[in-house]
Image (spheres, rainbow, N blue to C red):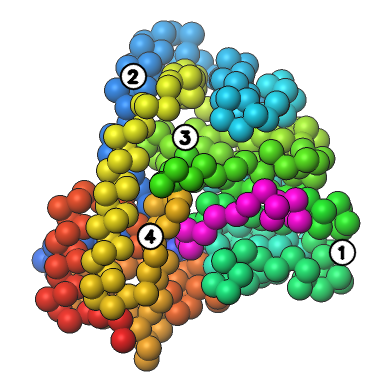
Amino acid sequence: MTETAERLHRLPRYLFAEIDRQIAAARARGVDVISFGIGDPDLPTPAPVVDALEQAAREPENHRYPSYEGMPAFRRAVAQWYARRFGVELDADTEIIALIGSKEGIAHISWCFVDPGDMNLVPDPGYPVYAAGTLLAGGTAYPLPLLPERGFLPDLQAVPAEVARKAKILFLNYPNNPTGAVASLEFFQEAVAFARKYDILICHDAAYTEVAFDGYRAPSFLQTPGAKDVGIEFHSLSKTYNMTGWRLGWAAGNRDAIEALGRLKTNVDSGVFQAIQYAGIQALQAPPELMSATLQAYDERRRLLAEGLRRLGWPVQAPRASIYFWIPVPHGYTSTEFSSLVLDKAGVFLTPGIGYGEHGEGYMRLSITLPTQRLREGLKRLEEAGIRYA
């Protein structure tokens, strides 16, 4: 067989594929693994959304190729949702494009703007796809450290001018994966000014805006004055409506960037199955109460996990948004060493922070997307195995 391309040699194994491998190996040894790993909602997609899919799937007109950009009705539903939720006005025809999940668009956006030798500014720790998409486009990912003393917000003023002038894209993600941090509109205003100064496209990953607690309402980057001049926002139905497997999301904002992404997509995919788009319309038009039970369950788990970790000595606060806890590794261990120790001693999997970048070392990520009884059992196992923070 012919040798694989150099870009593939440079591409690391995808973090969550490696997580699946480790858990599968432990289960093959007979271990009943409790995984706090992948942030995949365990609660079902709401019944009205499933019903809408079933009805649309029976219509022969939906069995043919869909439109590349997404059905006009779906894009209008996205625009209406943004207007209700954030007060943001979007042109459904030119400022929104449907995606096969937001991950797909995030991976492809670099292909639209990055040439070999260009740079993207990538949060570290951060969702691995930001750096992977940059690499596949022939660019270099310049890490922006997310540090606790800054509330896990990047210091844009610390980016060297010669780097900023080479940069094509600035990736942001709030509420944040993996840290659970949140950002204010004031920070987004700073980012818009930075992007204007250096002619950079901001790509904001907003997948977790609707998973928030204690009355907190996460803002959209597109609420910021001038945001549409310099950026786009990726969003998804995955975390908002427990639809990770459905693969439906969108990008919205700057019309030139949306057009470029659409032009690329017409050459590499054939759009989203229309029945799924009809289900997405049902979700977007539903009242907020549709997901209240899910948020209540997450809030219960969030409080339970925070209390349990504190009992074991961890200095943690429950996150205001997202489905993640970002906790420090005990002294004397790397994140990978500690993850292996916990899996071996307690049959519990915690995601090592190094998988999210160099500045993720020293941390572990825990997801609350597992049933409450399993979460309780996981904490019990940690306590019985003597896994504490020290």
Q: Residue 318 shows which numbered tag?
A: 4
Which residue is found at the position 29% from the left and 56% from the top? 303
Which residue is found at the position 17% from the left and 59% from the top? 376
The amino acid beneath tag 3 is Leu
The amino acid beneath tag 2 is Pro
Q: Residues within 10 Å of mark 3 (few under 14, many from 20)?
A: many
User: Could you tell me if residue 23 is visible in this image?
Assistant: no
The amino acid beneath tag 1 is Arg
Q: In the displayed structure, would residue 246 be above or below residue 343?
A: above
Q: Name the residue under label 1.
A: 165
Q: Which of 384 and 263 is in front in this view?
A: 384
Q: Nearer the viewer, mark 3 or mark 4?
A: 4
Q: Name the residue under label 2.
A: 48
Can you say which quadrant of the picture contains the C terminus? bottom left
Mark toward the start of the polypeptide (3 vs 2): 2
Q: Nearer the viewer, residue 162 or 227?
A: 227
Mark toward the start of the polypeptide (1 vs 3): 1
Which residue is found at the position 72% from the left and 61% from the top? 120
Mark toward the start of the polypeptide (3 vs 4): 3
Q: In the displayed structure, would residue 258 be above or below residue 344?
A: above
The amino acid beneath tag 4 is Ala
Instruction: Determine whether, in the image, residue 267 is placed left or right of residue 15.
Output: right
User: Could you tell me if residue 310 is visible in this image?
Assistant: yes
Q: Residues within 10 Å of mark 2 (few under 14, many from 20)?
A: some
Between marks 2 and 4, how big is the CA–CA gap? 31 Å
Q: What stretch is highlighted in magenta?
A: 178-191
Location of residue 226 in the rendering, given as x and y in whole percent from the top left corner: 80, 41
Q: Residue 237 shows which numbered tag?
A: 3
Mark toward the start of the polypeptide (1 vs 2): 2
